[in-house]
Amino acid sequence: MNNHTLLKIKNLRTHFFTRRGVVRAVDGVSFSVGVGEVLGIVGESGSGKSITCLSILRLLPQPAGRIIEGEIFLNGEDLLKKSEIEMRRFRGRQIAMIPQDPMSSLNPVFTIGDQMAAPLKYHLGLSGNQVAEKVKSLLTKVNIPSPVQRSKQYPHQMSGGMRQRILGGIGISCDPKLLIADEPTTALDVISQDQFIRLLKDIQVERRLSMIWVTHDMSIVAKACDRVVVMYAGKIVEMAAVETLFQQPAHPYTIGLMRSIPELNDSEQELFSIPGQPPDLLHQSSGCRFAPRCPEVNDICLEKYPPEVAISERHTVHCWQKVNHGR
Amino acid sequence: MQRYLIKRLFHSIITLFFVSILVFVLVRLSGDPTYILLSQDAPPEAREAFRRDWGLDKPILYQYGIWLIKGVQGDFGESILRKKPALALVMNHLWNTLQLVLVAVTFAVVLGVVVGVTSAVNPGGPVDWIGRYFSLLGQSAPTFWVGIMLMLLLAANWNLLPTSGKGGFETFLMPAFTLGWFSAAAVLRISKSSMLDVMGSEYIKTVRAMGLPKSLVVLKYALKNAAIPVVTMISLQFIALLGSSVIVETVFAWPGIGRLAVEAIFARDFPLIQTLTLVFATVFIIINLMVDILYGYIDPRIRYS
Amino acid sequence: MVIHNKVKSVSDHRYQACQMLKAAFRGVPLGAALILTAVVCLGLFGSLLAPHPPTAMNTQAMLIGPFSHSSKGFHLLGTDQLGRDILSRIMAGSHVSLIIGLSAVFMAGSIGTILGILAGYFGSWVDSLIMRITDTMFALPVLVLALVLAAIIGPGFSNMVLILGLVGWTGYARLIRGETLRIKDGQFVKYAKIAGTRPLRILLRHILPNVMNSVIVMATLQLGIMIIAEASLTFLGLGVQPPTPAWGSMVNEGRMFLSTAWWISAFPGLAILLTVMSVNILGDWIRIKLDPKFRQT
């Protein structure tokens, strides 16, 4: 399946320069996404997963957010070396994004059709009837009934699930190579969530789309992804194929995440939550960032950041425990 | 929409009715015009005759009733001071004031929106900095003093512009700037903050993520979203400027309703004051109605039913 | 914005507490604070600090320019048409602007807050009545209304406060009514009602403290406007009457001598400008501190 790499990120560092100090939101992240592959990025709020995605599109909140170093290759072209005008050719056209909150991500004062048409006109140069036809087929594609009428309506006349499907439609409208879905289902009810995941997965398979699927929900990872990156406090702590990660999680944080998934067939089991506070990105020690919350913490964990350890060919982890095991 | 408008119109008439009562009572509390319009040592009989002539000897409710019935027929009485029909007098002056206010509002809106939007799109840029000082000064400088200082510099010292009075376009410049500066500052601030809000919103992020160029994003999408609070502010400023015209017209000897109002109040010219305030209130209501209609056009979420 | 919040939410609480004190005074606009302190001092002790008696005339030294001497001494900002020292009059006049401005804001704020809370809390006809009055007052330009009132109750110091208070409360009433409506439906008010708390106690203990922030924010916006409104009415001759030195009337007196003695009008106006500007700058700063909508990381 993975014969060709589409996206390759090397040692990405994105920092925020605030009045209170430098927030190292993304701090040395490297991963790649193959053609037709779905990569899940998992982590709690503030782990840097959303910022990683915004860095790929170079749409960081200004003026605080800046990419300090790193390389982001899409089909061999380094996006960080592109000018702002060149980047427009990538945004929407090559890399598209489905936002988190469908309720606030559509413009309330323009019709759906108007908003869907804009990228079609700009990137594909379509006009008049072509645009209307394309909008209709996109709306049909994302299961919106009576698409012609709907395209003349405003966002407030639709449900959250519908709006998210429309945003999905906008995302795929210019045939991007990479689709970034930033927690696309958190704002939806359970049924719409399920529908949306299946819809997106169908489109992904049909078009052999590469995807980055950001989530904090391990059950979505299980349903939708091929490979997973686990992030904690701006760093990748573990990376593996989905099955491997579920069968042999190696990092104590990942193990904690696994235990926090509710299991339907086991109602007796108490739900586990990881003790301690989420990390403070302003004040980082030189040691492992998970150390203050880690059940298996050692002296060395507090002093030095653990190196990458390969457990198997495509399963890597950053943890001193595994370093010692390796010896 | 139609039903809404009718409802609004009905409310407006009630508001006007209340305004008329309020003003009628206030004005009659404000003192006896005979002491201002007749000489200090006029005999009591002359005062009585004067009151009888102007109907001021009747009970206040009766006076109001008469005035209301005549007013509905378009007769607002005669100005005691100028001895002319009050409504015609006010209307003559109203146009002068409206001209001045329109020029001032146009100046305030064009400058405020352009600078405000530019500042929001490029925060910290030179336009933003100049705009900040311009609006800070505009919101802090007393109108009458700005007018006098402009007069001192541009008219008295450098002889660039005529000192006062209404004539060609050049006579508009100083009064309109004086009148509009405060409003320009207000419009600037609201356009900037509204635009900043919109530019930081999720839906703008959506179109930016689709690669649309910033100019298109700003001009086509963001402006329409940002317009609603700006439109509200403009309507508020229009009203405020009608009020400040009192000062600017006094400073620049502008023949408008502001100066007429000061004159009428000093002279306790009851019919004129009543007519003036009613006209002020009517203009206010018309502006608000227009703004409401504009809202519906800008924001589809507001559909009157 | 979403990202900012996330970054903020992960920071350590203890650290935040440490920064609170520092943050409380950080970013105070120094220049504005200094000017305002000076104005307040002048308002309290102006007549004592003034180099000349503010109402003392001197026919030997009428209309002399800034930086000049007379038999009575040095006149930094010159003298007016009656030979009175401009600087001394400005210093004495700060009293009028400041006290009237503050009292008017206090009065308008009190009336508006009380009526707003009553309208929001009791609803029905109380609400309709108060809002109808507010609408009616909104339909007239503030200055025109103030003029009419000034004509009725006459000019003068305390009357100015009354007039400005009576025309300035409508904004508070509208804002606080909305806030009260929101708070009234909150859990704690519901529980207080179920517990049988008397309405007056609910209003004072639960609602009033919760709307105070909005009242203060509104008051900071209004203080500058009130100072200018007082000066404007005084300028038109309907406010504080001569010989009491007031900035508005000083500007007006200078109009007659504009081409020969510009300093009579220029300096008092400048004093208003600087005062109101400091009030506005400090107001912005307080607003950012108090209003969660403006708060940033």
Image (cartoon, grey):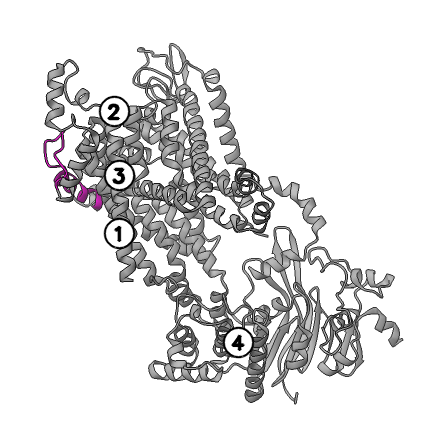
- Residue at mark 2 shares a chain with residue at mark 1: no
Label 3: few (<14), some or many (≥20) within 10 Å? many
- Say which element carries label 4: strand
- Please tell me the numbered disc located at residue B245: 3
Amino acid, disc 3: Ser
Q: In the figure, A305 relative to B272: above or below?
A: below
User: What whole-number distance in Å separates the C-alpha atoms at marks 3 and 1?
Assistant: 29 Å
Does the magenta-highlighted stretch encompass residue A57? no
Q: Quadrant of the N terminus of chain A?
A: bottom right
Chain that bears disc 2: C
Residue lying at the far right in this picture: please name it. Answer: A327
Q: Is residue B25 left or right of residue C281?
A: left
Q: Which residue is mark 4?
A: A96
Whether labels 2 and 4 belong to a single chain: the reply is no
Disc 1 is placed on an element classified as: helix
Calculate the distance from the C-alpha at mark 2 to the C-alpha at mark 4. 69 Å
The residue beneath circle 2 is C256
Tag of residue B29: none
Task: State the extent of the magenta-drawn residues as a range.
Answer: B75-98
Marked residue chain, label 1 = B
